[in-house]
Each structure stands twice: as structure tokens, then as C-alpha cells.
Image: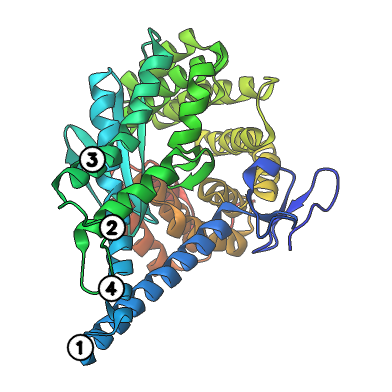
Amino acid sequence: MSKRLSVSLFKCGGCGCESEVEEAFRKLKLSLFAQPLFLCPECWSKRYIAKSKISFCIIGFAFLVGLIIHYYDPSIILGFFLMNIVLLYFFMQLMAIPHELGHAIVGKLLHYEIFLVIIGYGKTLFTRSVLGCEWEFRPFPIGGVTLIATRFSRFYRLRRFVMLLAGPLVHVIFIVILFWILPDGSLGSYSFIGMEPDIDFLLANTLLLVLNLWPYKITTAAGVIESDGLALITTPFSKQNKIEEHLATYYLLAAHKLSRLKQFVQAVSACEEGMRFNPDAVPLRVQLGVIFLSLNEFEKARSSFTELLACKDIHLGQKMIILNNIAYTNLLSGRSDLIEESNRYSEEAYKNIPWVPAIKGTRGAILVETGCVDEGLALLREAFDATSEPEGKARNAAYIALGEKLLGNMEESARNITVARTLDPQCKLLNRVNEASPGGVNL
């Protein structure tokens, strides 16, 4: 069991890593009276996926057993019972798509922009454009989430309430249709002697309606968010500062989308417009610094990040991200006078939230630059495996190439140069690799 070690130190109950950043952990209640288990996001994700795999195995086994029982003796109720339960589970997972579609369509009508719809959990399998927005499908079909935001404040509470209600309303519509088309008395005569997919579908939507309207917080592929029910309760009473935070989210998502499309100048404009509307929005200012990094405007990026350190509103987790960004900016700028600061900042960030791939990659790169090549390469390889976007993987691969070159492993260095160039043909860190002397460790 994880526990609080001191006034400001917390420990992951999975991997044992320690941190002062309480909000970086996810709390898992194992029982009503037990202390919560603290898990870092990486351990929580592994635990969640492991439980999902076990659930799928149980469901698959139940269906197989049901088929076998039905094959040998169709009169045994257990066979149909198991197959109906599996069908009920299948319908509950399948309904994630129309549920999120309800949020997306009504959101569009109410002048929301749909940035991304995520179906399932885990690493992305593939993406598709549906109704003008991007849908991301993941391997474990457990729920979904819609990344949606608006920049219009007029009737904000009402519009958000209706948009949130649209998801659960999809289940109400299916329930009403099924009640209308099912023969009279079919519900009262429901039994497990035979497959009854129509009743299973009705039950699936009823259960999902209750689960969605129940007020609680849920962990999704986009992080910990409010259930539709909790959001519906809190939205009418949203204070002005909360509304401003939600409105600032539009500009953050817009800037992130434009950055992915490499439209960096437009992304800067989106951040600046959002900051005029909400100058205290820390995520927006962090995003602006990241965009300046992509534009190789290192002094602007460094200025954006260092100004944030003086803000009173940043929490400890945000501070660690900012320290990491400053360290990485210093590194990319090539200023040798800042290497000590980079080392100090990246060490503090890695000490507190070592599971974040970007922080792990920065720490690895700085270790390579400061002569701790073997230790740095280990972190860079972990960061490479955990990073999803091509540009980030390319930067990690480039620093792996640099480390291997400094160790004299020219063949492995050349292989990673090829990997980096394939992932991002414009990767500027490759120039750093070309300038390094083979077998010479930089100190």
C-alpha cells in the first residue's frame, strides 16, 4: 500500500517512485475504509490495461462456455445466459460511438469546435475523419471522450448544458425506440431461453444512461474528467473564472491542432488571442513557449517559460513541466553557459515526475551532453518507446545517435540517424550529431 512519507513526499504503490507532486498521482480506492493507493500515470495505465485484458478474457471465456453448453444441451439456461451477458457487454462498448457522436453533432450546432473524438483506451490504432472532425480509435474499447470547446461566451452555461446532455440523450432515444417497436409484454416475458439481442440492447442503453448520469469523476484517455452527470450538475452554477478557463481551452486546443499541422505562425496567433482573453491561463503560455521552440525562436521560448516561474497560480506539477521546458530550450539553443542550469532544472523535474516521456527524454539528452552517456542513452530509449508523436521520437533518436557516436558506436549511431530522419526529415538536432567527434565525450 502506498502512503504519504512526509509532509511533501508521495510514493507510487506500483513502481515505488517518489514525488512531491501529489496531483501527479492518481488515487485508487481499494475499499471504503482503506487509504487510497497512489499510482503514477504509467503504473495506473498498466494496471487499467491489465484489468481490461482480464475482463476481455473472462468475457471471451464466458461466451465460449455458453456456446459449448448450448451445443451439447440447448435446454440448459446457463448457455443462453452467458451468451446474453456477453452480448450485453458488447452493446455497451459499441454504444460509445453514438454517445460521442451525440456530443459532437449537438456541439457543432451550438458553435462548438470538435478537435478530437477518442474511442477506447491505450495507444492509438488508427485515426479517421468523420463529419469533419478527427476520430482516434484505440485497442481497448472502453468508453470514449470528445475534446470539444468553444470561444463564444454568450449563453455559455446553457449551450454547454445542452451539449453535455446530448450524449445521455442518445441512450434515451434508443430506449424509447425499443419500447415502441418491441411487442407488448416482451419485457415482462424476458428469459434466458434463447438469444434476445433486442432486450440486451435495451438493457445496455439503460445501464449506460444510469452510469453516464451518475455524478462522479472518471479516468479516460484524455485524463481524469467529470462524468456527464456531474458536469450537468455543476455547469449551471459555473463561476465566471471557471467559464474563462473553459473558453481558454478552445485556444489551447486550437493552437495544439495548428502545431500538429505545422502551422506555427497561426498557432502563435491562437495563443496570443487566448491570452488577451485570459492572460493568466498557464497552459496557454506553456503552449506558446513550445510553439516558439518549434520555430527555433529559443530566446522567445525561454522568456515565455521563465516568466511563468514567477506566477503564483502555477501548481507544483506545472512547475516541473516548465523547468523541463527551460532545460530543453537551453539545450537546443546551444548556449554552453546555460548547461549547469539545464542540468539542475532537468534533475529536479525528473526527480518529481520521471514517468513523463518528455521529461525523461530531456534528462537523457542532458546526461549525454554532460558526459553520462550510458545513463542518458537508457533514458532516451525509454522516452523514444513512450513518445507517440513523430517529431518527439525523432529528437530522442537524434540524441541516441549522438550518444552512440560519442561512445564510438558508429553503426548504431548511423542507424538512429536514419530513424530520426525518417520520422522527421527537418529534425535540426541531426546537425548536432554531425558536428560531434566520434568517441569523444563532451564535458
Question: Which is nearer the eye, 201 or 142?
Answer: 201
Question: Which is nearer the eye, 419 or 316?
Answer: 316
Q: Which residue is mark 4?
A: 83
Q: Which residue is mark 3?
A: 176
Secondary structure beneath label 2? loop
Vertical placement of residue 360 versus 51, above or below? above
**Mark 4: few/some/many CA within 10 Å (<14, 14-19, 20+):** many
Secondary structure beneath label 1? helix
Which tag is nearer the camera, tag 2 or tag 4?
2
Question: Which residue lies at the image location 75% right of the left edge and 50% below the top edge?
Answer: 10
Give the image location of residue 123, x and y in percent.
Answer: 37, 56
Marks 3 and 4 sit apart, C-alpha to C-alpha, by 25 Å
Which tag is nearer the camera, tag 1 or tag 2?
2
Give the image location of residue 44, x and y in percent.
Answer: 56, 57
Q: Which residue is mark 1?
A: 71
N-terminal-most mark, 1 or 3: 1
Q: Amino acid at mark 4?
A: Met
User: From this viewpoint, which residue is outermost toward the bottom?
Assistant: 72
Marks 1 and 4 sit apart, C-alpha to C-alpha, by 12 Å
Q: Which residue is mark 2?
A: 188
